Image: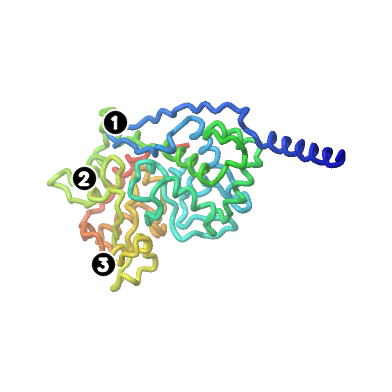
Amino acid sequence: MIRFLMVWMMLTFLGNCNRSASDLTHIPFEPTPYELEEPEHFVKMEIPADNPLTVEGVELGRQLFFERALSLDSTISCMSCHMPGRSFSDNVPLSVGVGGKKGVRSSMTLINTGYYHTGLFWDGRAYTLEDQALEPVVNPVEMASEWPEVERRLQQSETYPAMFRAAFGVSRKEEIDRFLVAKALAQFQRTLINSNSKFDKVKRGDAQFTASEQRGHDIFFDASQELPDAECAHCHIDPLFTTLEYENNGLDQVDDLDRFRDKGRGAITEQRYQNGKFRVPTLRNIARTAPYMHDGRFKTLAEVVEHYNEGGHFSENVSPNIRKLHLSDRDKADLIAFLGTLTEIYE
C-alpha cells in the first residue's frame, strides 16, 4: 500500500510538472486592436470575423514570415520568395525551394493581397489568405515540410509559445497549430498595403508627372484621342491595378484548349474554357518585380510591352483586348516611364 501511494504521488508530481511546463495562462492575454491605415480611394478591406487584426497577431505573423523553421531543413522562409526589398517577390523566373528545387511558377508580389477576394496564387486555388498560408509549408518544391513537425518546433520554441498566447490566448503550448500560424501570417500580409507611389502622389496633387510619364499615362488609360490606346486599363484598373480576374493574355499559341502546358485556372475549376488563364497581376511596383508572367518568361518591361504590341498569340479563349497595338518606340518608352510611377519602395 505504501509503495502504491509513493508511485501514485510520483506520477501526480510528474503530471503537475508537465502541466506547469506547458501551461501559458500566467502570460497576459490582452490583445490590442491593430489600426489598419487604409487609403481613402481603396475599397474597405474585408477582415474575417474570426481573425481580427491585433498588434500581437501582426507581430507574430511578421516573425513567422521570416521564420526558417517552417521549412524541412530550416533553410527557407516565406521571405525567401517574397523579399520586402523586391516588393515581396524574388526576381527569379521560378522560385527556388528546399534543396534548390525549382517551382513551376514565378513568385507573385504580396502587396495589397488583403484586398484580393477572387482567390490567391496565379490560379486562384486558395480563397483566403488563411487558406493560402497553409500550402507552402507542405509543398514539396517550396518548404517541403510537414505540419505536425512544424507545430512541434513552434511548441518547443523558447519564444513562440508566449507570442501565440499574447496573440490568440492559447492556454497550453499544445494548442499551437497550423491554423493559428496561418491566421498570424494572414494578419501580417493584410498590412502590406501599397498606395503611396508617385502615381498616388500625383492624384493627390503632391507631385507632377514628367512629360514622358504623362504621355505614358494617357496611353495606358486611353485618355487622349491623339494617342494610341495600349489596352492596359481594361485589366489593370486603378487603384489596385488589377481586376482580380483570370485571363489568357496570349502568351502561347494552341489550337486546342487542352494543350496548354500549364492549364492555370482551368486546372482548378476543371472548366476547359479557363485553361491557360491566370490571375491578372497588379502593376503596382511592377518595375521592381521582374521577370514577368506566371513563368517568368519576360526579363524586362520592354519585352512585356513588345509582347502586347505584337498582339500576342492566338487561342480560342484569348482575351479580346489582346491585339496589335501599333505603338511607336516613343509610345513604348513613355508607357514604361509611366509604369515606373507605380513604384513604392519597401526595405
What is the CA distance from the residue labelled 3 to the residue labelled 2? 24 Å
Question: Distance from label 2 to label 1 (Cα)?
Answer: 21 Å
Q: Position of residue 247 (x, y in %)?
A: 29, 57
Relative placement, left or right, of 344 versus 219 is right
Q: Which mark is residue 40?
A: 1
Residue at position x 52%, y 33% in the image? 167
Name the image quarter holding residue 259.
bottom left
What crowding class fits label 1: few (fewer than 14 Cα within 10 Å), some (14-19), or many (20 or more)? Answer: few
Question: According to the image, label 3 marks what residue?
Answer: 314
- Direction from residue 216 to residue 151 in the image, left or right: right
Question: Image quarter for residue 23?
Answer: top right
Q: Is 137 positioned to the left or the right of 23 in the image?
A: left
In this rendered view, identify the residue nearer to me: 312 or 238.
238
Image: 32 above or below 88: above
**Percent of width and height locating residue 24:** 62, 32
Which quadrant of the figure contains the N terminus? Answer: top right
Q: Secondary structure at mark 2?
A: helix
Q: Which residue is mark 2?
A: 221
Q: Amino acid at mark 1?
A: Glu
